[in-house]
Every structure is written in structure tokens, then in C-alpha cells.
Image (cartoon, rainbow, N blue to C red):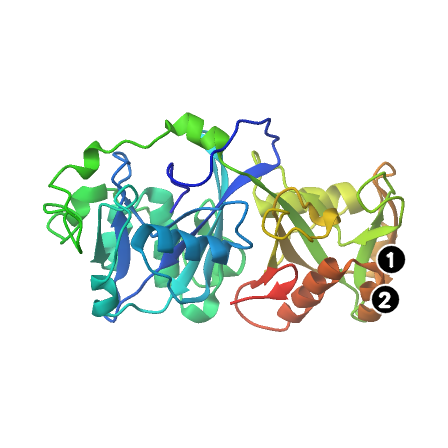
Amino acid sequence: MEASPTGGPELVERELSGRELLAAAGVLFPDDQGRVLVVRLPYDRKHPVAIPGGGWEPQDRSPRDTALREVAEELGFTPRLGPLACVDWTLDHHRPPIAAYLYWAEPLTPEQAAAFRPDLAEVGGWAWLTPDQAAHALPPRLSRRVTSCLRAPRTAGPLELEDSLPAGHTLDHLTVGPPPEYTGLAGVTGTAGMAGTVAMAGTDLPEGAAGRLEPPLDRATYLATRPRIRAKARAVFTDAAGRVLLVRLRPWDGPRGQVPYWTLPGGGIEADRELPRAATRREVREELGWEVEPGRLLALDWQPGAAAEPDADPATGRDTAVLVYLFDGGTVTDRMLDTITLPEDELVEWRLCTPEEAQELLTAPSWARTAAALAAREAAGGPVELVRGQAVG
């Protein structure tokens, strides 16, 4: 379910910064036997087995929209999505970083599966695999991602993964073991629709034909022209009285003009070189002078760009989507507050605020995500999924 080199509008090359990353969304379709649906990619010889899904497009208002659109394009129907299963951020020297969402879907009936109408350029076959089969057949990172979702209790979700390995609260539910041997398509030989006979559900591809299809772009060109998002990492600190710590940015000539601008501590993730937790540690160190290990991931807030939401607040990055990670910073002490050292070129003051005061100082989307993160502190499980600060799913 990494972004695939087919479909979508014509894209142009542009300058990319180290803060930009790809985004993708996939869907886990379980059946009543505990198996999961996988598809065969006819254009990918190296990694031919995948999960239904694909890359984010600027018109998608959220990763949920990406998942729905991709399944409709690939398999010809619109699924009913359940909760977010996991979020994963992966780094790779051979491609840009990717923020990947995986969603649970309602189990498909045999009648629904029989009605698949696949796009033959995208899907050359499909099969239901046991968790063990999927672990071997899927590419290593995707294998770890999917296997984590299948092994962990549903109540633990959404899972937090970094480089497809458990992070944060996910470590309480999963242990990191040796990776399974990667076998690709050979691991599902004899499974209907995936190996041997490719033709299924109305397709008429002869055996082996799928492997001869070529993507319209070579991999390097495809990756260079894919749309990017940006990401931020912020920390939610409170004192013993429940007041939240806010910082005020030095005014600049931006879309909001020369006005006081308050926010949670944190900032942009250097997407090409660090993971979200590392970014949070760095930002807290740079902004407050503290060495703090981020706690539980409380919320994931997706801020749509102008292509998906033309009236989006320009202060949230309306030219493209922005993904905000909100981590629990914990309870601050008077001693910690006494050691705050603000960077003079970036921040001008800090303040502990009651929820009512914070709502007055923050923008509406920023307050909504802060309130959701504070509420998530009181609940078990993984982060709450947000779009512009509002819970979805």
C-alpha cells in the first residue's frame, strides 16, 4: 500500500524541501477465518503483493478519503471503513519518507468479493492470506505494519509505529521479534488468484501477463513527482492544576499578519532525517531547553490543503496538507518552569493557561486538537484520529 506509480492527475516536477513527505493509506479487509485480503500488483516485479490502498492525492480531505478512493479505483467498490488500525512513519535512503495509515474495514462477504471489478492496471489478482502467509508475502516494512495490526488487540489501536516497528504505547502490546523471511509471491503459490492462474472475477489476464505490465513512469520519476505533505510534532504539557503550557511565536509577516500567535511547544518535522518522536525531543529542547522523552501519542490531526478544502485556515498550510502529531509531555514542575529558555529569534513568551484561556488564545483548529489531546489523556488505547481537530472514524 505504498503509493503506486499509476493513476492520478498529471504531475509536474518541483523543488522539494527536507520537510516534505509522502502519505498513503491502506485497508485491512478481514474475513471470518482470521485471514486478510491482499492484492497482486501487475506492474511491480520486486514486491508484487500488497494491501489494497495507495498514495494520497491533494483533493483527498483526509487519509480516510484516500483509502476509500483507492479501493474504489482498484477493486470497483466503496468499502465501509472502521477505526484507524495504525499510523506508521518510515525512512528510507532510496525514497522519500512516508506517513502511512492503515484502516480496518468491515469483513467482506463472499458475494461482495465475487463482485470485485478490478482495474487491471492496478490489480492482477487477489487472495485471502492467513497472518503467517501475509507476514511472508508482503514486503518487509508492510509486513511488519500489517502483522502488528493483526497481532495486537483491537483495543490497543490505533497503533503507533516508527519504521514499521512498535513505538510508544504499542510497545505495551507487542514485542519486536526477528522479521519473517520475505518470500513475495512464492509464499502464496497455489493460492487462487495470486499465483498459477491470475484470472479472477471477470479478469482475462493469461498466466504471467501481469508480470509483463509496466508502470507509466520509472520509479525515480514517479517518486519525484508525487504530491507531498508536511508534518509537525507538538507536546502537551500541563501543570498540577491542569493548565496547559503554550508558547507565543515572534510575529512575522505571514498569512495571519502581525498578530500574537500562540501554539503548543513543537514545530516542523525534518521529514527526511528524523522520526516524529525524535522531532518532538528536538523541538522541546530547542524551544524550552528541556530534555524530555515524549509520552503517549495522544492525537493525529490532519489539516487539509486548499485542493481539498479551499476555505482552510491559511495559517495551517493551505498549499498542502499538514499532519500534526501530538504527544503527551507530562506534568511540569516549578523547577522545570524555572529553567525554560526561549529561543529569542523564534519565541517571545510562554504561559500556563486554563482550558478557557487556551481556547481564547489558540486558533479554532489548534484549540480543537489540543482539547482532543487533553481528553485522550484520560482514555486508554492509541491516538485519536482528527481532521481539522474534529474526531473521525
Query: Where in the figure is residue 234, as x and y percent of width and height?
Result: 69, 52
Query: Where in the figure is residue 91, as x and y percent of width and height?
Result: 49, 38
Res 91 label: none
Q: Can residue 331 be seen here?
A: no
Compared with 300, 249 (above or below) is above
Label 1 sits on residue: 351
Please name the amino acid that badge 1 sits on. Arg
Please name the amino acid that badge 2 sits on. Glu
Label 2 sits on residue: 357
CB atoms at circles 1 and 2 under 8 Å apart?
Answer: yes
Tell me the residue at 11%/41% (across/down). Answer: 206
What secondary structure is found at the residue carrying circle 2? helix
Compared with 301, 33 (above or below) is below
Question: In screen coordinates, is 242 left or right of 306?
Answer: right
In-front residue for pair 160/56: 56
Tell me the residue at 84%/60% (across/down). Answer: 361
Tell me the residue at 81%/40% (across/down). Answer: 254
Question: In screen coordinates, is 361 left or right of 364?
Answer: right
In-front residue for pair 2/327: 2
Q: Residues within 10 Å of mark 2 (few under 14, many from 20)?
A: few
Compared with 27, 252 (above or below) is above
In-front residue for pair 353/360: 360
Question: In screen coordinates, is 93 left or right of 287?
Answer: left
**Mark 1 or mark 2, earlier in chain:** 1
State the CA–CA distance, disc 1 to disc 2. 10 Å
What secondary structure is found at the residue carrying circle 1? strand
Question: In screen coordinates, is 100 left or right of 132?
Answer: right
Query: Where in the figure is residue 246, as x and y percent of width and height?
Result: 81, 56
